[in-house]
Amino acid sequence: MNILLIDYDLGEMPGHNVRRVNLDAAGIVPVQRLLEDSSSEGGIFRPDVVIQMEHIGRRIFLSGLAELGCPKIFWAVDSHLNLFWQRWYGRLFDVVLTPHKSLFAAMPGEWRLRDVRSLAIPGSARQWRPHGARSHAASFVGRIDQNRLQRFRFAQLLEQRHGVVPCILSFQDMLALYDDTRTLPNESICREFNFRIMEGASCGCCVLTEDIGEDLAVNFEPGSEVLTYKHALELDDLLSFLAVRPAIAEKIGKAAQQRVLKSHLHEHRTARLMGMLPSLAAQTMDHSTAERVFALACIQWARSNPAYEKHLPALGALLEHLPPHPDVQAMRLRLLMESGQLEHARSLLVMILKADDSSSRPNDGERSFDLHTACAVAALRLGELPLFLTCFEQQWHLCPDLPVPRDLFEACIAWADLLAGTGRICQPGFHFDRTRHCPETAFEMAQMAQQFITGDESARQWVQKIAQCTDKTPFYSLALDYKAQISLDAPEDWRSSLAYATACLNTFLLDDGLAEASHAYELARSAGREDAFAVAVDPLLRRRLI
C-alpha cells in the first residue's frame, strides 16, 4: 500500500511504501506538490491513502484533495481550539480522528461531519517508579498568565493550598518531573481531553482532571485509572486526601501507566489507523463543492486570526469565482460587513432577501438558517430593523413562541434564542470580537447585543441572556462576572447567590465560592427554603454547609 503521511510518522511499516512529508511553512499547500517523486513511476507518488495530522504550531490547508481518488484521514488533535474551521476542512476527508469527539457531536446537525472517530495522541513507554521513590507529592507544568484567568486561579489554588508551584519546562524535563511526581492535577481550556492527561498517565502519575465525560472514558477508566473533579472544592479535597493516602494515588497511577502500555502507545495508534483502512472508502466530491468547502475552511480560520484585516482582499478573492451557494453568500456578506464595505453589504443583503431561490426558503432546512443568520446580523449592524424582520419571519417557525422584536436589542436577543434552539451555541477557539465579527452562534449573538442596550431594563435582560448562554458552553470562566451581577441585582434571592457560588467554584475561586454558598444557605434558611436549597446544592458542598 502506498501511504502519504503528512506531519506524522507511523514508524517502520514493512510491506508498505510510505512517503513521509513534514511541512515547514504554514498556509495553503497543493497536495499534488507533495506527490512529486522522481523515484516513482512517472515521477508521481500515487497514494492509496492520505493521512494528515494537524500541526499545532502551523496551520496547513491541503488544496486539491478531491482530485485524489483514495481515502483521506485528518487527525485533528487540537479541536478544542480549532473546531470553528475544522468543521469545514474536515469535510474534505473521509474520516476525522480526534480526542474531542464530543465537541464535534455537540455541533448542530448541519455542521457535523460524516465520520468522526475518537483517537487521542499516543503516550510513551516509561519506566515504572514506585511512588515511595518520588519526591513530589504533586506537580503542574504549564504556562500561567493573566490572559487565561481560569488557569491562573487554578495555579493560585495549587500553590496557596497545596504548595504546588507551576513551572514551564522542556518536554523531556517535564516527563522527568512527572516520573518523580505522585499526583498530577490537570486543567484544560475547554474541558477537553488534553495532552497532559496522557503525559501524566504515561509517567504513572495519579491524574486529577475535570469530569469531561466520554472523551476521557474511552481512554481511561474514571475512578480506577484516573480521578475526576467537578469543581475547586472537589479538587481541593482530592489533593488533600491523596496527600495522606499515597497508596491510593500509587494504585491509580500504576493502573494508568499500564493502560498506556496496553492501549495508548505509538504502535497502537499505527495499528488502529491501519485497521480502519480496509473498510474505508473514498467519498466522491465534485470539484465545485470541494473548492467551496476549501475556501470556506481557509476563510473561517483567517477570520479568527490577528492579521485578519490585512488578508481581507485575498479572502474575498477566494469567493469571487465560486458559483452561487447559500454558504458562499453568507460568507461573502460577512466579509463585506467585517471589512467595512457597508453599502456593498447592504446591496447584497437586499439582493439575497429578494431572491426567489429555494435555497433561501424555510423549507430548505438548516442550510437556509446560516444564510439568514448572516443576513439578520448584517441588518442589525446596518440598523435596518425591517430587513431583520424579513429574516425573522422566514425562520420564526423554529421558535414560534418568540415575540416579534420591537427594536435592535430585542432582535439580537431573539436571534440568539433561534441560534440556541438549533444547537448553534458557541464556536470553541474562535476569537470573537463583538465590534467586528458577524455572529454565527447564540453566545456570539448575545455578546453583540450589548451594543444595543438602551437602559436599565435591557441591561438586566442582557446579563440574564449572556449568563444563560455561558451556562451552555464549556467556558466556565465567562459566566463568573454575569452570575455576580445577577446576584447583586437580586440580593435576597438564594438561588442567584448559589449560582454565583457555583460559578466561583467552577473557576477555582474556592474561598469566594464557599463564602457565597454559605451566604446563599443563610438566605434560604431565612426564607424557609432550606429543603429546596438542599436539593439544589452540589452534594459535596451540601455536606460542607449543612
Image (cartoon, grey):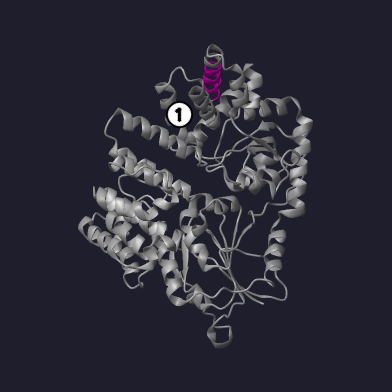
User: Picture coordinates of residue 496 (x, y %)?
Assistant: 48, 24
Q: Overall secondary structure of the magenta stretch?
A: helix
Q: Quadrant of residue 140?
A: top right
Q: Residue at x 73, y 50 (%)?
A: 260
- Residue at the left extreme of this rendering: 343
| 60 horizontally vs 446: left or right | right
- Residue 340 figure quarter: bottom left
**Does the magenta portion include 520?**
yes
Query: Would residue 146 be seen by someone viewing this image from the given angle?
Result: no
Q: In this view of the protein, can residue 383 be seen by the observer?
A: yes
Residue at horizontal 60 percent and vertical 23 percent from the top: 161
Looking at the image, residue 19 lies above or below residue 57: below
Q: Quadrant of the N terminus?
A: bottom right
**Along the line of sight, the residue nearer the viewer: 243 or 150:** 150
Mark 1, residue position: 483
Which quarter of the rendered picture does the C terminus lie within?
Answer: top right
Camera-nearest residue between 267 and 109: 109
Q: Is residue 158 above or below residue 526?
A: below
Q: Nearer the viewer, residue 441 or 224?
A: 441
Q: For numbered disc 1, what is the local secondary structure?
A: helix
- Residue 42 rendering spot, x and y as whole percentages: 54, 88
Q: Amino acid at mark 1?
A: Lys
How many residues crowd mark 1 within 10 Å: few (<14), some (14–19), many (20+)? Answer: many
- Quick one: which residue is furthest to the top in this view? 526
Q: Is residue 245 magenta?
A: no
Q: Position of residue 77 (x, y in %)?
A: 57, 55
Tell me where the magenta segment starts and ends, as one range. 510-521
Q: Position of residue 431 (x, y in %)?
A: 40, 47
533 or 272, which is in the foreground? 533
Q: Which of the 4 image quadrants contains residue 119?
A: bottom right
